[in-house]
Image (cartoon, helix red, strand yellow):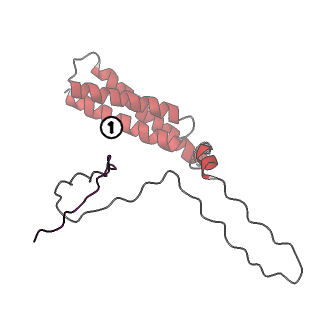
Amino acid sequence: MVPPPVIVAVPEKTPPQPTPPPPLPPQSGPSVTPPPQTAAKIPPPPPKQNKRHKKNHEAPVPAPEPAPAQQAAAAPPPQAAAPVQLSQVLSDDQRRDYEAHIHDSLDSANRNLSSIGNRQLTPQQETLRSQVLSFISQAQEARKTDLVTARSLAERADLLSKDLRDSLQ
């Protein structure tokens, strides 16, 4: 016995089938799925208000509306306030002591640089000389407003100038 013929209707055009994604390369360790990306953060909903009425019949104060995300993103960041520099309060005796110490240290540093004269310096010695000059300049500038910092800078200039002088002898 012959089986009956099977009739199959084939449409003229078949709808396109989606292509499967390409296989992922092998990875070691557990696979991690990244979190979904969002365009903008959604502000949290306003807090719920208690709907019970108070005995004194005051009208409830509405909560302020949160700013839309677009307006918040477009607003410029607030300007940072200028830093406030605090300095120590010194007595007159302390101030005179600091001034004298700064004067002595800067004089010593300048004498040490003068004693070097126009000698040929190695690159390392030239760097040290530049640092001494920088500390002297910074100390003189800080002396106008901050004696503690000026004294520290003057001492550094003096110590480095002595190291430089000693390296040449």
Q: Is residue 16 magenta?
A: yes
The amino acid type of the residue labelled 1 equals: Leu
Residue at position x 22%, y 28% in the image: 124
**In the image, is residue 19 above or below residue 149?**
below
- The residue identified by callout 1 is 159
Residue that appears at 28% across and 53% down: 10
Residue 17: x percent and y percent? 30, 52
Q: Nearer the viewer, residue 24 or 14?
A: 14
165 w.r.t. 26: above or below = above
Q: Position of residue 86 (x, y in %)?
A: 58, 48
Which of 27 and 102 lies nearest the eye of the viewer? 27
The image quarter containing residue 110 is: top left
Residue at (35% x, 30% y) in the render = 132
Q: Quadrant of the C terminus?
A: top left
Magenta stretch: dominant secondary structure: loop
| Residue 68 vertical position relative to residue 59 in the rendered view, above or below | above
Query: Is residue 159 in view from this perspective?
Result: yes
Instruction: In the displayed orientation, state which residue is furthest to the left.
Output: 1
Q: What are the residue bounds of the magenta stretch? A: 1-18
Q: Is residue 80 visible?
A: no
Give left or right: position of 74 versus 38: right
Q: Nearer the viewer, residue 29 or 56?
A: 29
Q: Residue furthest top?
A: 118
- The quadrant the N terminus occupies is bottom left
